Image (cartoon, rainbow, N blue to C red):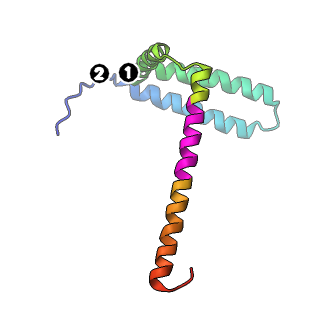
């Protein structure tokens, strides 16, 4: 199998990924070091740092490809025709009834097989 992919990544992309991961690692370390600080302050700084790391990652080739993918996925989700509440309820009831019927069928099949094996072997199971 040959893979014909074009590598459009910039050599600077590796540096950007390292910086983004370093920022995320720094958040974890800073949260541990500054454990006595207010949770609100730590959380605010963490949110800002994550936003910066995401911005840096989004400027890479793979990051921009992911953003394009996410936008396309959002467009596709909007095209989905979602069932009404009544359709969902009816489908749920049908599934529950079918599950109960299959459970009863398997129970009786198991009972018959156990009785048949007990009859053949002469052992009371």
Instruction: Please give left or right for residue 51 compared with residue 15 in the image.
Output: right
Which residue position holds label 1? 61
- Quadrant of residue 68 in the image? top left
Whether tag 1 and tag 2 are in contact, CB under 8 A, the answer is yes
Kindly identify the residue that appears in the image at 48 percent across and 80 percent down.
119
Which residue position holds label 2? 8
At label 2, counting other C-alpha atoms closer than 10 Å, the crowd grade (few under 14, some 14-19, many 20 or more) is few
Residue 101 magenta-highlighted? yes
Residue 110 magenta-highlighted? no
Kindly identify the residue that appears in the image at 55 percent across and 45 percent down.
99
Which stretch did the figure color magenta?
Answer: 91-103
At label 1, counting other C-alpha atoms closer than 10 Å, the crowd grade (few under 14, some 14-19, many 20 or more) is some
| Position in image of residue 16 (x %, y %) | 45, 25
Kindly identify the residue that appears in the image at 58 percent across and 20 percent down.
52
Instruction: Please give left or right for residue 24 compared with residue 121 in the image.
Output: right
| Position in image of residue 102 (x %, y %) | 52, 50
Kindly identify the residue that appears in the image at 47 percent across and 32 percent down.
18
| Position in image of residue 44 (x %, y %) | 73, 23
Most common secondary structure along the magenta stretch: helix
In the foreground, 123 or 27:
123
* Quadrant of the snapshot with the N terminus: top left
- Quadrant of residue 30 in the image? top right
């Amino acid at each position: 199998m040959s893979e014909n992919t074009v590598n459009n990544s910039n050599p600077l992309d590796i540096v950007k990924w390292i910086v983004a991961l370093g920022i995320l690692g720094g958040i974890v370390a800073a949260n541990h070091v500054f454990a006595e600080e207010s949770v609100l302050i730590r959380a605010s700084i963490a949110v800002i740092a994550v936003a910066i790391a995401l911005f840096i990652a989004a400027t890479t080739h793979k990051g921009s490809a992911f953003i394009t993918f996410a936008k396309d996925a959002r467009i596709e989700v909007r095209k989905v025709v979602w069932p009404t509440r009544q359709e969902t309820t009816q489908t749920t009831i049908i599934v529950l009834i079918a599950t109960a019927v299959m459970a009863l069928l398997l129970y009786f099949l198991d009972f018959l097989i156990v009785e048949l094996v007990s009859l053949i072997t002469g052992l009371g199971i």
